[in-house]
Image (spheres, rainbow, N blue to C red):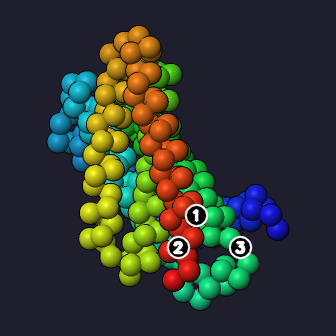
Amino acid sequence: MNTFQQIKTLVYKDIVLEWRSKYAINGILLYVVSTVFVCYQAFKSVDTFVWNALFWIILLFASINAISRSFVQESSYRQLYYHTLVSPRAVILSKIIYNTIVMLVLSIIAYAVYAITFKQSIGDPLLFTSAVLLGSMSFASVFTMISGISAKAGNNSTLMAVLGFPIIIPLIIVLIKLSNNALTGLDRGISSGEIVVLLAINVITITISLLLFPYLWRD
């Protein structure tokens, strides 16, 4: 099989396995809904900036729970079997694509639940939706790369936190600024810089994953 067919097969495998069990995704959805409910009980109503910050905090921790298990659930025997069949680049790209799909679904559900619970007018719904989608893709690419490194280092959760902190903080700052622009209805041209930065983060992260993961895969 060529690389494209390998990626397609691996993504399909992950989707089928997740659909059969549903335990992990149901647990994450329960986390999102319960967190939104707790926030509502605590605050009842919030202003625009607090609403925006709470949303991204909820989505951040939901993405950590969803993506950190990407390589943990793969046993060493299964990874050895993959090593004989597919290329390491196909493995990491399939994980990024699968986690992006998971995050897009999770973000849409989280946004729907959050918007219903906390009433908030959005000045530019299209720009805010774009921010949510770009944020989901960024979380997926960053945490997939970090999860792969952590898994090869013995699933060290401390290492994942140390590696993720310097990348996630700038990402969150850019996402909050972009979504604030959308909430206040500013001209879209003002937000072009933030959009370019988010796209650049995705490109750089995926490129680093493609360069680094084959060396990790050898171990």
- Marker disc for residue 92: 1
Q: Return the x and y of residue 38 as percentages of the image width and height.
A: 24, 47
- Marker disc for residue 54: none
Residue at the (65%, 80%) spot, across then down: 83
Nearer-N-terminus badge (1/2): 1
Q: Nearer the viewer, mark 3 or mark 2?
A: 2
Q: Amino acid at mark 2?
A: Tyr
Looking at the rendered structure, the secondary structure element under dot 2 is helix
Visible residue check, residue 25: no
* Quarter assignment of residue 172: top left
Task: Decide if residue 178 is on the left or right side of residue 7.
Answer: left
Residue identified by numbered label 3:
86
Residue identified by numbered label 2:
215
Q: Marks 1/2: CA distance?
A: 12 Å
Residue closest to the far left: 42
Q: Quadrant of the N terminus?
A: bottom right
Q: Marks 1/3: CA distance?
A: 11 Å
Q: Amino acid at mark 1?
A: Ile
Looking at the rendered structure, the secondary structure element under dot 3 is loop
Residue at the (58%, 50%) spot, across then down: 101
